[in-house]
Structure formats: structure tokens, C-alpha cells
Image (cartoon, helix red, strand yellow):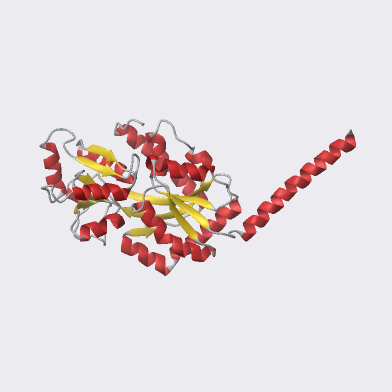
Amino acid sequence: MTSLISRQMLCAILATTGCITAASASAETFPQRAITLIAPFAPGGSVDITARLIADAWAKQLGQSVVIENRAGASGNIGMAAVARAQPDGYTLAINTMSLAINPSLFKTMPFDTQKDLRSVGTVATSQHVLTVTNSLPVNNVAELLAYIRERPDNALSFGSAGTGSTFHMAAELFKSVSKTQILHVPYKGGGPAMLDTISGQVQMSFPVLSAAKPQVDGGKLKPLGVTGKTRSPLLPDVPTIAESGLSDYEFNTWFVISAPADTPQAIVDTLNAKLGDALRSPEVIERMKKEGFEALISTPAQTDEMVSAEMTRWAGITRAAGIEPN
């Protein structure tokens, strides 16, 4: 009996050692093939744009392709759930924005647990949004917009978003809260479709990220009324901040992070983070981000996890204060 137990224990130890050795070898040689980066929103929105800003430079640093896959739906939950269920080998990742921290407060049931099923690889960037209106709306600044809204019945105007819980949505909810106005929310499956319907007048307002809105603003298809940050943006220097336009308590900036399945080995996460940081420091990425109105944000995986956790707490409070009921 003793020898049988000993043999069983020895087999178990050898098997465990083999697994550890294999995992270490895998981490040391990572990556050996292309990495899929899931953008959980439709093409044309801020998450998609951010992914494309870094993919090539990150791929050069990693020595393997970074393939972007748009998997939209449920305000980013569909794409993020796919990553949470993926093999934790570093080859399936997600890029997301503040929806990662906001959605747990907006959905009664989530297809994954943000903190238990995912782990952070690192931050990517921050960006302002811009309040835009359809050209047919007879307003030219924030003060005129607020007067127009207040002179009409509740929900006479509507705003399009990239989905419930998206940054488009929350930038608008914060605007409603600070201005004490009522505007109807119309969610879409991404920022691109929301902007297109703002241009056509199907909805009257939207809060797209600056990089996505600038071509439409420059082309005269959207009317910009105010940027959401603390200071004016070099991309739209003639557009005032919403704060300087009369809503002094308004400020909104979005952030972008890379996530991996929770059980991804630390060594692989560290490699991904280090190479991401190198990509974000590269002159080509710095210049591209500047042109698109982004600012690179570099942090460790642990710092990113802490930020996401703190943001989940903060946005839970904001959604409660705004009276937004979970779907």
C-alpha cells in the first residue's frame, strides 16, 4: 500500500512539475503566433480607433501580428465575455474603455465577472469626448442648447450612444445630471452608427470621442458645441470646453485598457505589458495619438487592476445618483 501511495504521489509530483515546466517554457517563448485583440464595439468607434492606433507598433515589439476582431453587442459585454472564456494563454485579449467599469452597475446580470474572470495587461490612453449636434438643430453653443431643451417638453431631444454603459452614454448622463435636463437615450451597437444617425438627424445629439468626431466636424457634417475635458483640445482649439460654457462642474475623460483571461500566467502578462509600454513610447504611436487627440497612458498590470476597481466603485455611485436603473 505504501509503495502504491508513493508511486501515486510521485506521479502527481512529476505531472505537476511537468506542467510548471511547460508553462515556464511557454512564457519564455511567448508569443509564437498571432494575437487576437477583440474590440467589443463596432468599427469606427473610439475603442476600434484606439486598437488600430497601437496594433502595428505593438506587433513590431512582440514580433507577431496583432489582429483586431470587432465583436459588438450588449455594450461591450459580448466581446468581453468571449475573452473571459478564452484560453488563458495570452493569444486572446480585449481592448475596452470605461464600459468595463460601468457595465456592472448597469446590467442586472453580467455574462462574466470583471474582477474574477479578467485581469489587466495595462492601460493604453485617455481621450476627451465632444458634444456634437445635428446641423439642423438651431443652436450654436451649449447655452443655446440648454435653452432649447428647457423650452420644450421632456425628452424632446434624443442622444445616440455606442450602447448602454458606453462612454458616449455616460458622458451624456453626466451632462444631464450637471445641467438638470432630460434627454432621451438611444443606444446603438457602436459609436460609428450613433454618429451616422446624429448626422442624419435621427437623433439630435451625441458625445463621440474626439478622434472619431473630428473628420465629421471638419467635413461640416456635425456641429461641435463643447469638449468634455478640463482644457480645450488642440484638435478643435476653437471649440470651448463644456465647463467654460456655463457648466463649471462638468468634466469627462475616457480611458482605454487591455484585458486578458484571469488565469493568464503572470510572465505572459508581464511580457505583454512591457511590449505595450514600448509601443506607447515609440515616436510613431506618440505622433499618431497626438493627431487623434489621445494621450498615452502607461501603467503596470497591478496599477491597471487598481484603477479599474476604483472606477467600478466611482461609477456605481454616479449611476445611482443619476437614477439609472440596471437593465
Task: Give the residue displayed 27% in from the left and 47% down from the top.
Answer: 194
Question: Left or right: 175 with respect to 45?
Answer: left
Q: Quadrant of the N terminus?
A: top right
Residue 311 seen from this side: no
Question: Left or right: 183 with respect to 98?
Answer: left
* Residue 318 position in % (x across, y down): 33, 37
| Nearer the observer, 310 or 25 | 25
* Residue 323 position in % (x across, y down): 30, 31
Task: Give the residue displayed 69% in from the left and 53% down from the top.
Answer: 22
Q: Residue furthest bottom?
A: 283
| Nearer the observer, 122 or 84 | 84
Give the image quarter of residue 185. Answer: top left
Is 241 placed above or below 160 here?
Answer: below
Is 165 placed above or below 253 here?
Answer: above
| Nearer the observer, 186 or 24 | 186
Residue 192 seen from this side: yes
Question: Left or right: 53 with respect to 324?
Answer: right
Question: Left or right: 133 with respect to 99?
Answer: left
* Residue 193 position in % (x across, y down): 29, 48
Number of numbered discs: 0
* Residue 263 position in % (x across, y down): 58, 45
Q: Quadrant of the C terminus?
A: top left
Task: Give the residue displayed 16% in from the left and 47% down from the top.
Answer: 142
